[in-house]
Structures are given as structure tokens and as C-alpha cells.
């Protein structure tokens, strides 16, 4: 029973350390306590910034298309005859 308990504890610690590496997108057997080098930090930040810019540009393009073409049918578009009051 004592061997089983020791094996369980050691296995849990190793699994935790491997999980930390997986969570940081690193190889499973790399050192989980090492810091990222400056080059890796810059690369990760640039990749994230590029993704954010693409997402924002897509959102802005969608809003611009909607503004130019007007609301699509089925959306809260007012009826054509009630858009301007008649005098």
C-alpha cells in the first residue's frame, strides 16, 4: 500500500508539471519553471496582436457593409411608406 501511495504522489506531480507545459504550448518534457526568452515573448505578443487586428478589421468591415447597404430584410427595417411623414 505504501508503494502505491508513493507511486500515486509521484505520478500526480509529474502529470501536473506536464500539464503546465501543455497549458503554455510547450513540449511536454520541457522545464515548466523556465521563463520565456525575450524573442519568444515578442513572437507570442506579435502573433496575438495580429489575430486581434484581423478580428477587429473583420468587425469594422461588417459594420461598414451594413451601413452602406442598410439593414437587411428581416431586421428591424421600418416600412418604406412610413419612413417620411406626408404633409
Image: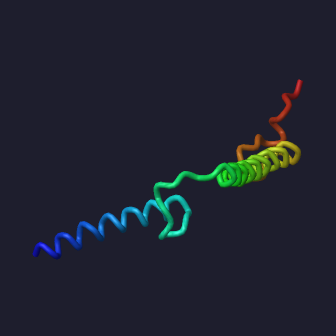
Q: Could you tell me if residue 74 is visible in this image?
A: no
As drawn, 48 above or below 27: above
As drawn, 78 above or below 26: above
User: Which quadrant of the view contains residue 83?
Assistant: top right
Where's residue 49, x and y in %?
72, 48
Residue at image coords 27%, 68% = 10
Outermost residue, top direction? Answer: 87
Where's residue 81, x and y in %?
83, 39
User: Which quadrant of the view contains residue 4?
Assistant: bottom left
Outermost residue, left direction? Answer: 1
User: Which quadrant of the view contains residue 82?
Assistant: top right
Residue at image coords 70%, 49% = 42
Which is more toward the observer, 79 or 3? Answer: 3
As drawn, 49 above or below 5: above
Where's residue 72, x and y in %?
78, 51
Q: Is 68 displayed left or right of 25 in the figure?
A: right
Which is more toward the observer, 20 or 54? Answer: 20
Q: Could you tell me if residue 78 is visible in this image?
A: yes
Residue at image coords 54%, 51% = 35
Number of numbered callouts drawn: 0
Visual colour scheme: rainbow
Q: In which quadrant of the rendered image does the N terminus lie?
A: bottom left
Q: Is 23 displayed left or right of 42 in the figure?
A: left
Q: In which quadrant of the rendered image does the C terminus lie?
A: top right
Which is more toward the observer, 2 or 75? Answer: 2
Which is more toward the observer, 54 or 73? Answer: 54
Where's residue 31, x and y in %?
48, 62
Residue at image coords 20%, 70% = 6
Amino acid at each position: 500500500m505504501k508503494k502505491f501511495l508513493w507511486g500515486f504522489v509521484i505520478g500526480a506531480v509529474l502529470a501536473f508539471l506536464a500539464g503546465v507545459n501543455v497549458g503554455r504550448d510547450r513540449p511536454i518534457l520541457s522545464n515548466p519553471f523556465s521563463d520565456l526568452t525575450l524573442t519568444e515573448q515578442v513572437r507570442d505578443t506579435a502573433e496575438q496582436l495580429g489575430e486581434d487586428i484581423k478580428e477587429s478589421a473583420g468587425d469594422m468591415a461588417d459594420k461598414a457593409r451594413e451601413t452602406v447597404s442598410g439593414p437587411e430584410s428581416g431586421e428591424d427595417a421600418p416600412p418604406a411608406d412610413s419612413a417620411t411623414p406626408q404633409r
